[in-house]
Image: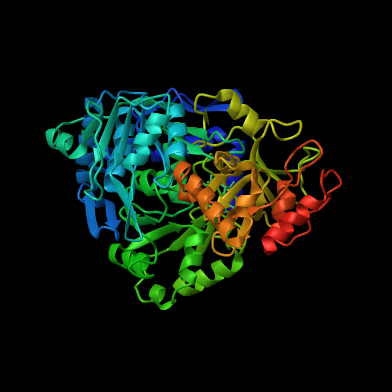
Amino acid sequence: MTSYADFHRRSIEDRDGFWTEQAQLIDWQTPFNQVCDYSKPPFANWFAGGKTNLCYNAVDRHLATRPDQNALIFVSTETDIEKAYSFRELHSEVQRMAAILKDLGVSKGDRVLIYMPMVAEACFAMLACARIGAIHSVVFGGFASHSLASRIEDAKPVAIISSDAGMRGGKVVPYKHLLDEAVSLSAHKPSKVLMVDRALSDFPKVAGRDEDYATLRAKHMDTLVPCEWVDSSHPSYILYTSGTTGKPKGVQRDTAGYAVALAASMKHIYMGVPGETYFSTSDIGWVVGHSYIIYGPLIAGMATIMYEGLPIRPDAGIWWKLVEKYQVSVMFSAPTAARVLRKQDESFLTKYDLSSLKALFLAGEPLDEPTATWISGAINKPIIDNYWQTETGWPIMAICNGVEPAATKFGSPGKAVYGFDVRLIDETTGEEIHEANKKGVIAVEGPLPPGCLQTIWGDDERFVKTYWSSIHNRVMYSTFDWGVKDEDGYFFILGRTDDVINVAGHRLGTREIEESISSHTNVAEVAVVGVADQLKGQVAVAFVVLKDPSVANTEADAKKVEAAIMKVVDEQLGAVARPARVRFVHVLPKTRSGKLLRRAIQAVCEGRDPGDLTTMEDPGALQQIKDSVVS
Ligand code: AMP
């Protein structure tokens, strides 16, 4: 067996040889003639000259060997619908959806925005786009009209696929009015909107624009749509993520590099075997959903579970019941979900036969030791933390048990994953840190391995400026995370270097939330910071200076204004971005040059020392923050 150290070393030192081997894990229509064209750094063009198709690799290629095996298992504990699709059935559904898209005028390179709950049709839609070479952009169903509008405006979709509603905790969450409002706010208008009507919520139709999925599906029951072979670098999707400005960044992914990276990760990291079942509890609106609900497991010939519902409804045993029923071998979730389960009776987790399960992978936010210890004890399975970002599409750090089994260390997402030349950099000097346990910025030497972002959609300059220009004197990819590495090469993540916060594993930009709150007529100034939270890891807390503070003079009045501000965020960005608390102050802590002292505010909120405050304009401002937190 190759040692992991050798495996990783080879991935960096013999990049071409290494990735040529990994590229055999997928099917090609035309083989590539160059492994990595890095002639225009930091833009990497993987598998140049090749042609393939993501949908072909996820669906069609399995028809010969496993046509009747489960491919997609849709489970909704909200609507009590459970339906499994074999690879053959999935193939038919995807072709129907692809035929509909063609009918709606979508062709290769066009964008299709998908704003849907966790329903099987969302999976068909993603695969159908890949099939015809259209570029999908899935927007998380929890985002509201303003968030959606900015994405529509940036991606300029020809068509949008949506649904009447999602459901959460037994409550219907209507989508259509938010979509209509988003389209009216956006300068770009899609020509068609395809509605998957779940009969959960009535919605108005826009004549000439809105089409009914069931009607068009019936028309295309037997239509065959072949895969469009696309260049390796053809964009497969755009996925928006928050940054430090109010404008979300469209992470653009290629086709071949992504397929190879996912196929390799299923083997080396997740140890998924064809024919087994993979269960990722994420949502298709996030990167984990793209990589490990849809594409990764299907490319590997596994069945994948798509789950609509909460982890504790009808009770906290639901996920484990599914593990038993579908013989799940690999499970992927987030630390917050584990913390939610920890509040329930442990017997819910132990009551089912989990013998098929090899490991539970957790990612998206720091995994604290008590949670890791608890869940590994409760299910008696290895818990494998892995660290990555929307940008990378697959793990930067993990334990690659598929290469060489290795111990995990609590609090660490493991070692640098093959293909990632990870370095720790001193923030001020730009020098590499070689010393063990010394804090630095986690950076990656270019080229990034296959599967990572190609660029920011429509904005190459922002891609270079944002990710490749922040390390002093060096052209390196910055993760914007702090970290340390111990003597054994295990990394520990110490939080973001920028103003991005992480609530229950979801990345939110504080700027976006601030901009939304600022639109409230009585808000003069606002600062949003992420504050440590026992359940969600972090929550957003807003500090607001009101134009007319008298409206929040009493506690009851302050509560009313707080609710009104939260409502603005709910309506514009979605409940996912709603701050946990809105506090009122008369002045915000700033430097003399007017920069908000967010880290000091955060420190005060968490009861830590705010550090050097010599540049602070008004020393009393921080005291107000302190008082408002205590009150
Ligand atoms: P997102 O792109 O939304 O997945 O957020 C990525 C960010 O989440 C990273 O830059 C980290 O700050 C954080 N993150 C992801 N996975 C982990 C992990 N395993 N441990 C600690 N932080 C993580």
Q: Horizontal and vertical percent for residue 339? A: 51, 66
In screen coordinates, is 200 left or right of 412?
left
Query: Please, is residue 345 above or below residue 329 in the view?
Result: below
Q: Position of residue 93 (x, y in %)?
A: 21, 40
Viewer-nearest residue: 621 or 39: 621
Residue 532 located left or right of residue 70: right
Residue 30 appears in the rendering: no
Q: In the depicted view, which residue is nearer to us: 598 or 397?
A: 598
Res 168 quadrant in image:
bottom left
For the C terminus, give its image quadrant. Answer: bottom right
Residue at horizontal 58 percent and vertical 63 percent from the top: 407
Colour scheme of the picture: rainbow
- Percent x, y of residue 621: 77, 50
Q: Residue visible at 45% across and 57% down?
A: 333
Q: Quadrant of residue 191?
A: top left
Of 245 and 616, which appears nearest the observer? 616
Looking at the image, the residue that sits furthest to the front is 550
Q: Position of residue 107 (x, y in %)?
A: 30, 23
Q: Is residue 572 left or right of residue 319?
A: right
Could you tell me if residue 117 is visible in this image? yes
Q: Is residue 205 left or right of residue 394?
A: left
Circle count: 0
Q: Residue sitting at 69 percent across and 48 percent down?
A: 482
